[in-house]
Amino acid sequence: MCGRVAMFTPPERVARLLEATLAAGLDPEGRPSWNVGPQRTLFALTGLDDRVLDRYRWGLLPSWAKDASISNRLFNARGETVAEKPSFRSAFAHRPCVVAVDGFYEWDHRDGRKKQPHYFTRSDGSLLLFAGLHESWRDRSLGDDAPVVNTCTIITTTPNDDIDGIHDRMPVVLESSEIEPWLDAEGLERDVRLALLDPAPKGTLTHYGVATTVGNVRNDGPELIEPSEAGSLF
């Protein structure tokens, strides 16, 4: 599962690093956050020849959904079933995206340790690029003039050794060379794209313990990613 991320790199810089343009109306400086949870804003890349970075609400809302609350449960999609699950299969086939973040959090539940969040980043210090899906939705009960809601989800897979047993899932981390094939939903066969959803190679991620204050999404600020050791229960 991936349910909390940090995103403080300005969208303008993210777009430059990903060789993309900013969507119309997107603030180049953005609003940095060290504690982004579901139903809040993520930045994602779409397009092949013309890459665009835009904002999306975290929690996929399929176009056919009658009740918007379904998105509360769809902030992650399992890579093993994403091509078949009704909530995700259309987006997998036609609407992939790449979600860019600075880091993500997982809670340590290992035996003999105090429950504590850990902050994960790339070992090389670059942005984390997650395989994702996006959708556009309108509330049909409001008529044809209802505003469009753009949403996304992050795909997860089985953990690699970098997770150190902290969790039984991890986000699908893409390398820069994998952006184009992942986004090429119409050009590549399904099995080729599914192969991109394997765990990242060992050594891709690094992590350390942080304060439990990140557990409340109302807390925000760079102090949330400062190291904090919890110690042992015994």
Image (cartoon, rainbow, N blue to C red):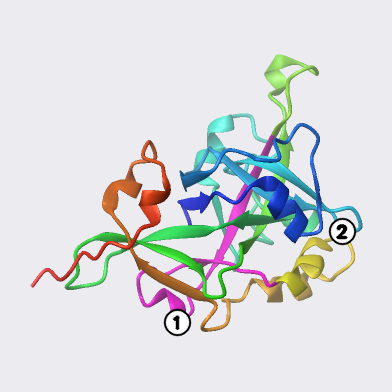
The residue depicted at 69 percent of the width and 73 percent of the height is 196
Relative to 28, 198 lies left or right: left
Q: CA distance from mark 1 to mark 2?
A: 32 Å
Q: Nearer the viewer, residue 94 or 34?
A: 34
Mark yes or no: residue 196 visible: yes
Q: Which residues are magenta?
A: 150-175
- The dot on residue 48 is 2
Taking depth in this image into account, of 149 and 214 the one nearest to the observer is 214
The residue positioned 42% from the left and 49% from the top of the image is 222
Question: Which residue is nearer to you in this view: 230 or 181?
Answer: 230
Question: Residue 41: where, in percent of width, then height?
Answer: 58, 40
Based on the picture, tell me whether residue 218 belongs to the magenta stretch: no
Residue 68's place in the image compared with 147, above or below, is below
Instruction: Give the numbered dot on residue 161.
Output: 1
Query: Where residue 25 sits: x, y (%)?
Result: 76, 31
Side of 104 where 79 appears, left or right: right
- Does 65 sit left or right of 48 as displayed? left
Name which quarter of the figure residue 82 lies in.
bottom right
Label 2: state its secondary structure.
loop
Please tell me whether residue 222 is drawn above or below residue 121 in the rendered image.
above
Tag 1: residue type? Asp
Which residue type does callout 2 highlight?
Leu
From the image, which quarter does the C terminus lie in?
Answer: bottom left
